[in-house]
Image (cartoon, rainbow, N blue to C red):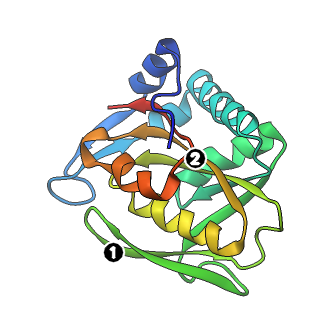
Amino acid sequence: MTSTEAASSELRDLLLSRIRDVADYPQPGVMFKDITPLLADPVAFNALVDALAGLCTRHAATKIVGLEARGFILAAPAAARARLGFVPVRKAGKLPGPTLAQGYALEYGTAEIEVHADAFGPGDRVIVIDDVLATGGTAEAALDLVGRTGASVVGVAVLLELEALGGRERLAPVLKDVPLDALVVV
């Protein structure tokens, strides 16, 4: 696994200035990173989308996976900007038709995600995008799902990495030489 912070200091400062901390959400002891102020700022949001689209182009992706729910908000416009296909990875029971499912542990519970069984074709090169890398459970489950389809993961990109929660270390054995790009690391 390669890469760490993938943004210039100017972009990092802009993005970080638009992320708000919300204490004890969704449960006591969790410091939630609220990106809605960033999304509402057209300069910051477009800079974020440009940065993510650039990563997708640099890694020669053919499709972009967005992780429910905030990953959708970031991945879909990045896919459009990079002129690539977008594949949603959703919570269990939200996709029609045949799906592949993967369970995983959250920092405050468990969950299951799904992808359409036919979402990827032979030779697809996939970059997985999410808003925050915390413990790495969601990303690890998504990587497993993509791998089960036969597509290749060529990168993981996140807006924000919470370094103290160890997600990068958890993903290292799975990613090996695949880059993990965090625009902001705190």
Disc 1 versus disc 2: distance between alpha carbons? 26 Å
Return the residue nearer the eye: 142 or 152. 152
Q: Is residue 106 above or below residue 55?
A: below
Q: Quadrant of residue 162?
A: top left
Where residue 120 appears, as percent x and y from the top left, is 77, 67
Return the residue nearer the eye: 57 or 44. 57
Q: Residue at x 40, y 22 (%)?
A: 17
**For this view, does 168 lie left or right of residue 81?**
left
Where residue 113 appears, as percent x and y from the top left, is 52, 74
Element carrying mark 1: strand
Disc 1 vs disc 2: Cβ atoms closer than 8 Å?
A: no
Specify the farthest residue to the top: 10
Return the residue nearer the eye: 177 or 137. 177
Q: Amino acid at mark 2?
A: Val
Where residue 74 appears, as percent x and y from the top left, is 60, 44
Q: Residue at x 43, y 56 (%)?
A: 173
Which of the two marks, 1 or 2, is nearer to us in this view? 2
Residue at numbered disc 1: 110
Quadrant occupied by the C terminus = top left
Q: Is residue 115 above or below residue 137?
A: below
Neighbour class for label 1 at 10 Å: few (<14), some, many (≥20)? few
Element carrying mark 2: loop
Neighbour class for label 2 at 10 Å: few (<14), some, many (≥20)? some
Q: Which mark is residue 71?
A: none
Badge 1 or badge 2: first in the primary sequence: 1
**For this view, does 65 lie left or right of residue 25?**
right
Q: Is residue 66 above or below residue 43?
A: below
Q: Is residue 149 above or below residue 50?
A: below
Q: Amino acid at mark 1?
A: Thr
Residue at numbered disc 2: 178
